[in-house]
């Protein structure tokens, strides 16, 4: 046999072996899809699928997730309602209260999301009691399911601010003259006006009328001198706390996690005047190109394995009820899974009755 014939035969045998191997694998449950792995296009905050969490979902579903940059709930609505938006993306996650109206439309048949096949999302039946009424539904159909949640509070340095003081466990810590020049607020009309309103005693800030909003605006203008700055970016806020430029700020769970991993003695407060909490729901656009794969990803992100990985990596909380037994009592309290047991005034982040008025009011605060 010539050298050329030998090489041809070896190449043929190699190709045959690969084909037989693929055929053999296809006979193993779950392996046939391996050679046909699909990629879905998704829109959600990258923090919910960091590098250490991504394999939990992609390995469980055999689906590669190409997540596009997430900007905000309003940007998600804009993407969805743009020409071709309901067919351009396979999977989206955004704030439930913001998405409810746009997803459903004014009446039955105008939904921008696909009615979910709940038989493909069995994990969605295992939600924490706090979120059992949060799926977006209409006429017996489900269009979204909450997959993760969290709360906004004051992040503060325990070496500079006493943990057990009544002032510390309130939004007032950001507005009281005691810490003037050592605190930072977020440059955001929605959350910052809500925090100020809660500190003033408004139990339901998003239901405020024009008179109440006017009083809160005057309060913020009067207290503006107390703020070292109003942060806009995640890194900016974290660096201010890390450097000691501020001792307390309006903050997010993941900021607490980053700062603690840097060795700083910081924590979040549990404001007795009202804790702002939220959840984000996953949905499949109405004409998504890969709905089966999107359903599989949704099911995985409703599951216990994903929830544990997400909380341990980012400290954001998952909606799976399995977390209640999978985590120790100490861990549940540390992360906030015991929220219902704390006896706090829980205030869901919602769209104000007059958002235009809030934005105008915030403009006056910044201009003052």
Image (cartoon, rainbow, N blue to C red):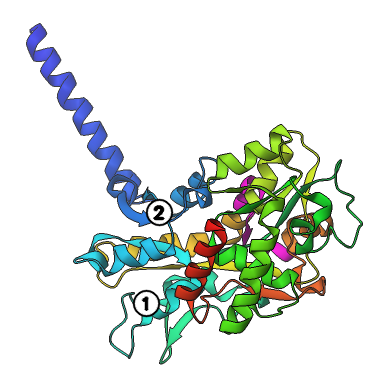
Question: In the depicted view, which residue is nearer to us: 146 or 269?
Answer: 269
For the C terminus, the image quarter is: bottom right
| Residue 319 in magenta stretch | yes
Categorize mark 1 by other alpha carbons within 10 Å: few (<14), some (14-19), many (20+).
some
Question: In the depicted view, which residue is nearer to us: 20 or 303?
Answer: 303
Q: Which mark is residue 165?
A: none
Give the residue pinned by disc 1: 102
Could you tell me which secondary element the residue under label 2 belongs to? loop
For the N terminus, the image quarter is: top left
* Residue 203 horizontal/vertical position (percent): 71, 79
| Residue 345 in magenta stretch | no
Report the residue at 63% width, 49% height from top. 254
Give the residue pinned by disc 2: 30
Question: In the depicted view, which residue is nearer to us: 217 or 151?
Answer: 217
Q: Which one is closest to the eye, mark 1 or mark 2?
A: 1
* Residue 181 horizontal/vertical position (percent): 74, 45
Q: Is any part of residue 291 visible from this angle?
A: no
Q: Is residue 288 left or right of residue 268?
A: left
Q: Is residue 117 left or right of residue 14?
A: right
Report the residue at 41% width, 80% height from top. 101
Categorize mark 2 by other alpha carbons within 10 Å: few (<14), some (14-19), many (20+).
few
* Residue 342 horizontal/vertical position (percent): 82, 70
> Residue 328 appears in which quarter of the rendering?
bottom right
Please report contact status of discs 1 and 2: CB closer than 8 Å, yes or no: no
Tag 2 or tag 1, which sits nearer the N-term? 2
Extreme residue in the front direction = 368
Q: Is residue 16 above or below residue 207?
A: above
Q: Is residue 56 above or below residue 149?
A: above
Could you tell me which secondary element the residue under label 1 belongs to? helix
Rounded to the nearest whole Å, what is the CA distance between mark 1 and mark 2?
37 Å
Q: Report the span colored magenta.
A: 308-324
């Amino acid at each position: 046999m010539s050298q050329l014939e030998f090489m041809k035969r070896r190449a043929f045998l190699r190709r045959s072996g690969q084909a037989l191997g693929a055929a053999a694998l296809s006979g193993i449950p779950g392996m046939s899809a391996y050679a046909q792995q699909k990629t879905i296009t998704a829109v959600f905050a990258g923090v919910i699928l960091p590098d250490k969490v991504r394999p939990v979902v992609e390995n469980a579903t055999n689906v590669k997730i190409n997540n596009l940059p997430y900007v905000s709930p309003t940007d998600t609505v804009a993407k969805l309602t743009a020409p071709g938006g309901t067919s351009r993306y396979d999977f989206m996650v955004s704030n439930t209260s913001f998405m409810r109206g746009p997803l459903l439309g004014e009446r039955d048949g105008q939904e921008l999301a696909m009615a979910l096949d709940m038989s493909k999302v069995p994990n969605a039946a295992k939600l924490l009691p706090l979120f059992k009424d949060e799926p977006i539904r209409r006429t017996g159909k489900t269009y979204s399911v909450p997959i993760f949640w969290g709360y906004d509070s004051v992040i503060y340095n325990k070496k500079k601010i006493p943990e057990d003081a009544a002032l510390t466990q309130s939004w007032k810590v950001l507005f009281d003259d005691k810490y003037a020049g050592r605190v930072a607020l977020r440059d955001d009309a929605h959350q910052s006006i809500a925090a100020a309103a809660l500190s003033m005693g408004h139990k339901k800030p998003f239901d405020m009328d024009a008179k109440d909003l006017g009083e809160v605006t005057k309060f913020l203008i009067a207290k503006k001198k107390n703020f070292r700055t109003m942060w806009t970016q995640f890194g900016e806020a974290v660096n201010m706390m890390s450097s000691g430029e501020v001792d307390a700020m309006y903050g997010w769970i993941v900021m607490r996690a980053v700062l603690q991993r840097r060795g700083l003695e910081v924590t979040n407060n549990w404001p007795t005047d009202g804790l702002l909490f939220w959840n984000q729901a996953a949905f499949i656009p109405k004409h998504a190109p890969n709905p089966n794969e999107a359903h599989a990803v949704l099911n995985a992100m409703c599951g216990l394995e994903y929830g544990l990985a997400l909380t341990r990596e980012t400290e954001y909380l998952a909606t799976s009820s399995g977390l209640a037994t999978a985590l120790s009592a100490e861990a549940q309290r540390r992360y906030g899974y015991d929220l219902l047991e704390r006896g706090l005034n829980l205030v869901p982040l919602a769209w104000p009755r007059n958002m235009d008025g809030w934005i105008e009011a915030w403009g006056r605060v910044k201009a003052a």
